[in-house]
């Protein structure tokens, strides 16, 4: 996309995570500033590895939603840090199980709502611009709370978003704020970039790539990511490389960049 085509409220001066991820997935909704930031990632980490990480993560999201909708009967999804619409979005997967399943997308980046409203128009889908670091802006949002029924089981997706939350912003506090509102029988899905299995050089490359972005990148160890599931019971196979979470026969790509898992609330 050229900057002349950008809607007015879109920040253009800095790369954003949503648009960088869109570029890494081969989408079209990004600008020169995002391509330049990704070029830095590709230079240090390797283009194939970065793109494979994005794809592996996206495939995990798809399988987690399918599992929750088809095997666990979940009919409500709150997809936080949802990113720009791409192929196989949460509502499309959920609607294959039940066209009346309700999905709310939340993202801090206003470009998601701008593109989403046009592409995801659907009676059973909503899109909200909010910052999950302030959970009350989501849990106190009438559009979200009128549409979703928190007294019934509901899945919250935090897929590839907690690495944009610093330790000072206290990720555990954020998960807890949502968990405390969920009914028994609810779920959480989380994936996260990790230091485990990543060289110092690659870790530095990820941080440098996001250094000028609207939000910094924080890599976490496996125990730190596991701690985000406090209060939930991890479903089999536990917290694993996303490609190993209920893999399909030909599961690809495989990286050691992330961990992912799904937790159940008893
Ligand atoms: C790497 S993308 C992941 C998109 C999608 N969840 C997926 O896994 O395919 C991360 C998204 O999180 C969003 N994000 C980052 N910080 C956020 C925050 N504090 N509140 C809400 N969204 C946030 C970014 O704008 C971006 O769209």
Image (cartoon, helix red, strand yellow):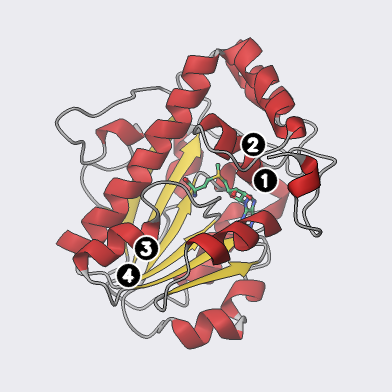
Query: Could one spot residue 41 in this view of the protein?
Result: yes
Query: Alpha-carbon distance for marks 2 and 3?
Result: 28 Å
Query: Alpha-carbon distance for marks 4 and 1?
Result: 26 Å
Residue position marked by numbered label 3 in the rendering? 91
Query: Alpha-carbon distance for marks 4 and 2?
Result: 27 Å
Residue position marked by numbered label 4 in the rendering? 186
Q: Where is residue 184 in the image (x, y as percent from the top left)?
A: 30, 76
Q: Where is residue 109 in the image (x, y as percent from the top left)?
A: 68, 55
Q: Earlier in the sequence, mark 4 or mark 3?
A: 3
Q: Which of marks 4 and 1 is nearer the N terminus?
A: 1
The quadrant the N terminus occupies is: top right
The quadrant the C terminus occupies is: bottom left
Number of residues whose C-alpha sits closer than 10 Å to that of mark 2, classed few (under 14), some (14–19) or many (20 or more) = some
Is 15 left or right of 263, judged from the image as shown?
right
Number of residues whose C-alpha sits closer than 10 Å to that of mark 4, classed few (under 14), some (14–19) or many (20 or more) = many
Disc 3 or disc 1, which is closer to the eye? 3
Number of residues whose C-alpha sits closer than 10 Å to that of mark 1, classed few (under 14), some (14–19) or many (20 or more) = few
Residue at image coords 45%, 37%: 223
Looking at this view, name the residue that lies furthest to the right: 13
Disc 4 or disc 1, which is closer to the eye? 4
Residue position marked by numbered label 2 in the rendering? 218
Q: Is label 4 in contact with label 2 (beta carbons under 8 Å)? A: no
Query: Could one spot residue 109 in this view of the protein?
Result: no
Name the image quarter holding residue 90. bottom left
Disc 4 or disc 3, which is closer to the eye? 3
Disc 2 or disc 3, which is closer to the eye? 3
Q: Which label number is shown at residue 167?
A: 1
Q: Which of marks 1 and 2 is nearer the N terminus?
A: 1
Is 158 left or right of 238, judged from the image as shown?
right
């Amino acid at each position: 996309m050229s900057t002349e085509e950008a809607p007015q409220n879109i920040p253009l001066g800095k790369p954003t995570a949503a648009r960088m991820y869109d570029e890494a997935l081969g989408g079209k909704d990004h600008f020169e500033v995002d391509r330049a930031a990704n070029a830095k990632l590709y230079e240090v980490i390797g283009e194939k590895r970065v793109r494979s990480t994005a794809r592996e993560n996206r495939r995990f999201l798809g399988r987690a939603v399918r599992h929750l909708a088809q095997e666990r009967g979940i009919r409500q999804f709150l997809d936080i840090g949802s990113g720009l619409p791409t192929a196989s979005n949460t509502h499309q997967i959920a609607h294959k199980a039940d066209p009346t399943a309700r999905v709310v997308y939340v993202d801090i980046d206003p470009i998601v709502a701008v593109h989403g409203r046009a592409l995801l128009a659907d009676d059973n889908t909503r899109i909200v611009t909010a910052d999950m670091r302030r959970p009350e802006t989501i849990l106190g949002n009438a559009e979200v709370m009128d549409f979703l029924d928190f007294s019934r089981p509901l899945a919250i997706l935090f897929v590839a978003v907690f690495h944009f939350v610093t330790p000072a912003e206290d990720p555990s506090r954020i998960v807890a704020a949502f968990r405390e509102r969920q009914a028994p029988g609810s779920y959480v899905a989380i994936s996260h970039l990790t230091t485990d299995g990543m060289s110092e050089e690659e870790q530095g490359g990820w941080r440098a790539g996001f250094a000028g972005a609207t939000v910094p990148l924080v890599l976490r160890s496996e125990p730190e990511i596991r701690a985000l599931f406090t209060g939930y019971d991890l479903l089999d196979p536990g917290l694993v490389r996303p490609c190993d979470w209920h893999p399909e026969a030909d599961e690809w790509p495989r990286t050691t960049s992330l961990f992912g898992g799904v937790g159940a609330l008893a």
